[in-house]
Amino acid sequence: MEQLVAVEPVIVIGAGAAGLAVAQALIKAGVATAILERESRLAEPWRRRHEQLHLNTHRDLSALPGLAYPKGTPAFPHRDVVIRHMNDFHEANRLPVEFGVSVEAVMFTGDHWAVRTSAGSRLARHVVVATGRDREPFTPQWKGMQAFAGRIVHSADFGDAQAYAGKKVLVVGAGNSGFDALNHLSGIDTSAVWLSARSGPALLPKRIGKIAVHRLSPLMARLPPRVADVVMAATQRLVFGDLTKFGMPPAPAGGASRLMSDYTAIAADDGAVDAIKSGRIVVVPGIREFTRDGVILADGSLIAPDIVIAATGYRTGLERMVGNLGVLDEKGVPLFNGGQDDPKLPGLWFTGMRPSIRGCFANAAILAKAIARRIAGATHPSSASR
């Protein structure tokens, strides 16, 4: 006789910041929740990032719900502090994370969801996908790159900044990841650094005087996107001047608009712009192709880097899990996020899949409350009216 599988109220897939936040919100709302995490411990993606990594978001807006960072934490916490914070949150809330369980597919059966995992199949009324928008580093397949004698690494594998001392380095991409790499390289005695940019960034300083710019993000998030675009562009021009004089292409759209339309995060400067203005970082056109000994740029010129850092973004990697449900756009990003859903697929939710002016931690808390409110209302209808 076939063994019956109990239908669980909620399964959360992923125990990153978004997954932990939504699980806590659901449990506080009285909804039994299981959390499946493919890694063997929390914050594994953070542990893989380079040692110099600090948040671009202020600590007061980068804490998980109900848990502040310890007294004395710098304004922009280090990677290791973030890892500790996530573990402290997990322990303080006694969240039921099941480690080492990867989800292979999620299927709708008509009145509940079947979740196929590495540890067997499970059923749930609601599934919250919280695997992250930067799950899989993306590197374009440039013509000739296999023949290139130098190294090509993704910005996720930046490593120790000191390893670039004396090297000729090409950073491809002027977004958030690109400027993070450039900020670190600006303090290293490299042989040469180039920035290949097809379009200019929405770029803000980490600080203006003693003011951490990110602390103003809740106000910016309340503005209409076009107004926020104007404010960011004016701030960028006031602080940095006209970067097109140094070869930087103009941005194709405003920072808030790009955040919403193509999910391009706002970059933070912490030394890179000064290096560009002084000529220590040279802005060059986009890549046409690689050769054995160098890179041919869009204008036909040739440069010969030792290392190419592909700051070319990430993909969600959700095609295998939910690709057959028609819920992803052409880039693999879910069509809905947070408290939004698809009426044809009741009980499927996504969180943490898009960048936010507020930053990923603050946004995780907002989306968690929205999802928990919807699920608790469906599970306990009387609670929705309270």
Image: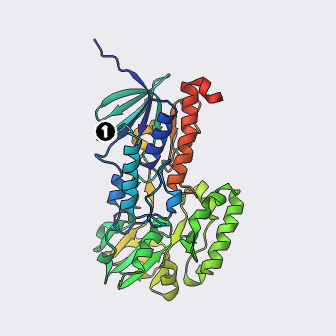
Which residue occupies the foreground of this view, 354 or 146? Answer: 354
Q: Quadrant of the N terminus?
A: top left
Which residue occupies the foreground of this view, 186 or 99? Answer: 99
Q: Position of residue 175 (x, y in %)?
A: 50, 67
Q: Is residue 58 visible?
A: yes
Q: Position of residue 75 (x, y in %)?
A: 49, 66
Q: Quadrant of the C terminus?
A: top right
Query: Is residue 3 toward the left or the right of residue 218 in the image?
Result: left
Q: Is residue 344 visible?
A: no
Relative to residue 116, is residue 137 depicted above or below?
A: below
**How many residues crowd around disc 1 within 10 Å: few (fewer than 14), some, or many (20 or more)?**
some
For image coordinates 37% across by 78% down, the residue present is: 169
Relative to residue 203, is residue 186 depicted above or below?
A: below
Residue 114 position by quadrant: top left
Q: Position of residue 98 (x, y in %)?
A: 32, 38
Query: Is residue 177 toward the left or the right of residue 256 in the image?
Result: left
Residue 83 position by quadrant: bottom left
For image coordinates 46% across by 40% down, the residue present is: 24
Q: Residue most toward the top? A: 1
Which residue occupies the foreground of this view, 252 or 379? Answer: 379
Relative to residue 22, is residue 161 depicted above or below?
A: below
Q: Which residue is mark 1?
A: 101
